[in-house]
Each structure stands twice: as C-alpha cells, then as structure tokens.
Amino acid sequence: MLKTKLCELLDIEHPILQGGMAWVADAHLAAAVSNAGGLGIIAAMNANGAQLRQQIHLAKEMTNKPFGVNVMLMSPYVEEAAAVICEEKIPVVTTGAGNPTRFMAAWKEAGCKVIPVVPSAALAKMVERRGAAAVIAEGGESGGHIGELNTMALVPQVCDAVSIPVIAAGGIADGRGLAAALMLGACGVQMGTRFIVADECTAHDNFKEKIIAAKDIDTIVTGKRLGHPCRALKNDFSRKFAEMEYDMSVSNEELEQYGVGALRRAVVDGDLQGGSFLCGECAGLVKERMSCRQIIEDVVNGAQRALGGASQWL
Amino acid sequence: MKEKIVDIIAAYKGVDAAEIATDKPFNEIGLDSLDVAELVMQIEDACGVEIDITPELNCIDKLVEYIESK
C-alpha cells in the first residue's frame, strides 16, 4: 500500500489530488475523485459566491470524504469565494494564479488547510512562512496557466526550500510519474489532464476524445506576450492565437478579446475549432477512458511497480 | 533601512546601488512577481519583519515606508 504523509495530512487514502481545472473540476468530478480515495477539488474559477456554494453543497451530497476548493486569485469574485470557503468549512483550499497570503489567516482560522500552487522556491518559502499546510510545485508541463520552470527541476528545489509537504504537478499522468515525483522528494501528486477523460467528468466528449487522440507534440503554449502563458491542445483557435501573438499589428486588447469565452466553448460546447482545450504535455500518455477509481488504482499500482522495480539498478 | 534594502536589491540584480530607482514600480526596474517574492524572503530575513506583499507595495520607497511603520 503506497502511503505518504500527505495521506495523513489530508485524511485521504492515496496521495493524489485532482487539479482545480476551470469549467472541468465541478462537484461531480471532485466527489468521484474523493470517493475513489484521492482528493477531489472544485474549481471556483470565476464563479460568484452563490454559484460556488451550490457546487460545494452538491459535492457534499455526493461524498462524505474530504474534498477541496481551488481559488483562482485573479477572479473578480475572489473575496466572495474566500468567504464561502470559510463559511462552508472546506478542509482543503488550493490556490492558483497569484499570491494567496492575504487570505491565508482567515482560511486557517476557519480550519482550512491551505495548499498554494507555487511556480518557484521563493514563493513556496513565503507561503510556508504564512502557514501553508503544503505546497503544490507545478511545472510548465501542465495545462492552463504555467510558470517558467519544469517539474523535474522545480520539485526538488521546492523540496529543499521548505519543510512542509510538497505535491508535484505538471506532466504526471501515470504510475511512473507518481514514482518519479516521490523520488524527487514530493509526497504526492496533482493530476489534471488524466482526470478530464474520467467517466464522471462532465467535460464535453469532444474534449475527452481530443486528449485520447493526442500525441506528445500536440500541445502549444500561447499568451507569453500578455504575461500569462497558457498551455492548450493545438487546434485552429490556439494556432491562430499564436499567429496573432507574433503579429505586432494586433494589440494586446485584441488578443485578450480573441480569447474571451474560448475555455467554455471547449469544455461545455466541445467546439473543436474555436475552443481552448487546456491540457498538459502528458495528454499523449492518456489513452483510455475510465472511472476515477480505475484511474487512481492504475496510477497507484503503476507507481508501486516502478518503485519496486527500481532496486534492480542497485 | 532604505540603504539596506537597496543593497539587497542591487546585489540580486547584479548592479550598482546607485542604479536602482526607488520610486519606480518593481516591474519597471526589471523585477517580476517571482523576483519580488524572492526579494521579500531575503528582506524579511535581513530585517526581521514579516512583509505582507500587496499590489500597493509596488516600489522600494513604499516597501521601506511599510517596514518602518511595523
């Protein structure tokens, strides 16, 4: 049985978190992951307080296991989301797209374990000083908004910088990824892309099929010019975005405008041409649709095999 | 205090302290948010204070004022 200190910290069976993917990580997916022994996470994304509370209540109806909420710190409703988390006594809060320190005291007081996503060792150190229970060191292989460092280099440097548990993310989709993360010093992983194709995930079938069909080279990073690089599957939308990005006759405002609504078009409408299918480099590793329970079992069993086989090198 | 902070930032950037503009926003003196996080950790260690970095603390002068008020 693969157990790490993360299991004890979060009261979960397996050291696997599900990423807080906007439009994808709803109550259905979060509850299914938690029921399967991982930690499911609801993405607050740009939802207002009432919408987030509705998702939390729905998840509570579907699971009695702990689950978390991911707060997107650039959301216009971030204050409302932060307050709802305290009121609903959510056991775990993960954060992304910024520095969460201004909310941490209130969340801690409400009994929430705060686990920020960090792109650097210094930010990991900062949130540790402000009382983070753990950090998610997310490398640039991941989908959505990404930092500069990759998982292989980031995770051990974050592990060296802090004494709280480190969760590795970015590029992890199978047991080998989990085993490697543990070897880098992490005590668990967060996976996003692999869970998009889960049976319980409500994302459009076109999105799932696009991931299943993806190869290693099928993602692209756009948005560097706007200061927030973002990884997505290649399609008409992302190729056009990349072209516009290098066209200096296109203003930043026009570029921003081009991206509006593209995420929803991908996840909800399955718009293969006009949607932005945020997805990690590991999409090429995802070859089969299965339930959250099967995904977690597959990853844990694969990690145990990889770790068990590693002694042959000694 | 100001001199100490300017020295830390100058050493971080590898430039002479005289080249650091203390009234310009961090992004205009070549420091992104991750640089600022790194520097805040170094300044906390050097000055023994906790710095709650907010969007308003966007230049050295404001940072110094904040630290001196603590």
Image (cartoon, coloured by chain):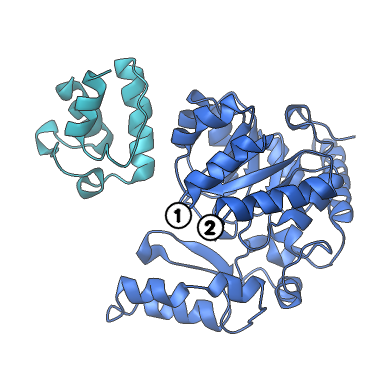
Chain colours: A blue, B cyan
Q: Pick whichever, A173 or B68, lies toward us.
A: B68
Image point 84% across, 67% down: which residue? A288
- Judged from the image, the secondary structure of the residue bearing numbered disc 2 is loop
Tell me if label 1 and label 2 are in contact, CB under 8 Å.
yes
| Residue A188, above or below A281 | above
Q: Quadrant of residue B50?
A: top left
Q: Mark 1 to mark 2: distance in Å?
A: 7 Å
Image point 84% across, 50% down: which residue? A62
| Disc 2 residue type (three-letter) | Asn
Image point 77% across, 65% down: which residue? A197
Provide the chain ID for the residue under circle 2: A
Residue A191 visible in image: no
Residue A216 visible in image: yes
The circle on residue A221 is: none
Which residue corresponds to mark 2? A46
Residue A5 position, x and y percent, is 75, 27
Which residue corresponds to mark 1? A76
Q: Quadrant of residue A162?
A: top right
| Disc 1 residue type (three-letter) | Pro
